[in-house]
Image (cartoon, rainbow, N blue to C red):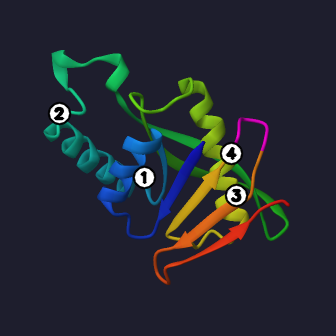
């Protein structure tokens, strides 16, 4: 499964594409920034007929805005950071409970790789296994491989 972590100036189109392809995307920004991105993506999906609102709501096409607390170690001290993530239930191929665990894994990997990439692509085979992580920086258009060998 692929999970994209977006940070910095988040492009709504990147969020929409990640949700349509993978069903989950992590937003490393402020809570207000994540709420703004959520609303813009929600509007775009509704206009495209891919998300229904009000009485047309169907559980299988919901867009969920969730937050997770991620345990991290910064300068040798344990910390907890909060991250927002969106789940589009129509394309997310796992139970919603799994989204939290995937989100935590993706944020921890992003942070371990420096936490400065605008677009971080995290691959996992499941909740307990980790594979190498490909990181693509939008700023310099290069892709590097990180992770365990």
The stretch in magenta equals: 125-129
Residue 80 in the figure: left or right of residue 56: right
- Per the image, the residue denoted by label 3 is 109
- Per the image, the residue denoted by label 4 is 124
Observer-nearest of 3 and 68: 3
Among numbered discs 4 and 1, the one appearing first in the sequence: 1
Tag nearer the camera, 1 or 2: 2
Residue 124 percent location from the top left of the image: 68, 45
Secondary structure at numbered mark 3:
helix
Determine the residue positioned at 62% across, 68% down: 115
Looking at this view, name the residue that lies furthest to the left: 47
Determine the residue positioned at 29% across, 53% down: 36
Q: CA distance from mark 4 to mark 3?
A: 11 Å
The crowd level at tag 2 (other Cα within 10 Å; few <14, some 14-19, many 20+) is few
On screen, residue 46 above or below 138:
above
Disc on res. 102 = none
Q: CA distance from mark 1 to mark 2?
A: 27 Å
Within the image, what quadrant is residue 127 found in?
top right
Tag nearer the camera, 3 or 2: 2
Looking at this view, name the residue that lies furthest to the bottom: 140
Among numbered discs 3 and 2, the one appearing first in the sequence: 2
Report the quarter where the N terminus lies. top right
- Per the image, the residue denoted by label 2 is 49
The answer to whether marks 3 and 1 mark residues whose Cβ atoms lie closer than 8 Å is no
- Per the image, the residue denoted by label 1 is 31
Residue 84 percent location from the top left of the image: 49, 47
């Amino acid at each position: 499964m692929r999970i994209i972590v977006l940070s910095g100036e988040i492009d709504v189109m990147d969020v929409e594409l990640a949700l349509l392809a993978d069903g989950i995307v992590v937003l490393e920004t402020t809570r207000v920034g994540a709420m703004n991105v959520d609303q813009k993506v929600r509007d775009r999906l509704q206009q495209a007929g891919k998300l229904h609102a009000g009485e047309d709501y169907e559980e299988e096409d919901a867009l969920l805005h969730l937050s997770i607390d991620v345990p991290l170690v910064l300068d040798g001290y344990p910390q907890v950071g909060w991250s927002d993530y969106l789940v589009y239930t129509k394309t997310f191929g796992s139970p919603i409970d799994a989204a939290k665990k995937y989100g935590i894994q993706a944020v921890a990997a992003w942070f371990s790789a420096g936490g400065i990439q605008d677009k971080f692509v995290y691959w996992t085979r499941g909740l307990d296994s980790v594979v190498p992580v490909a990181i693509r920086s939008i700023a310099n258009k290069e892709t590097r491989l990180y992770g365990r060998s």
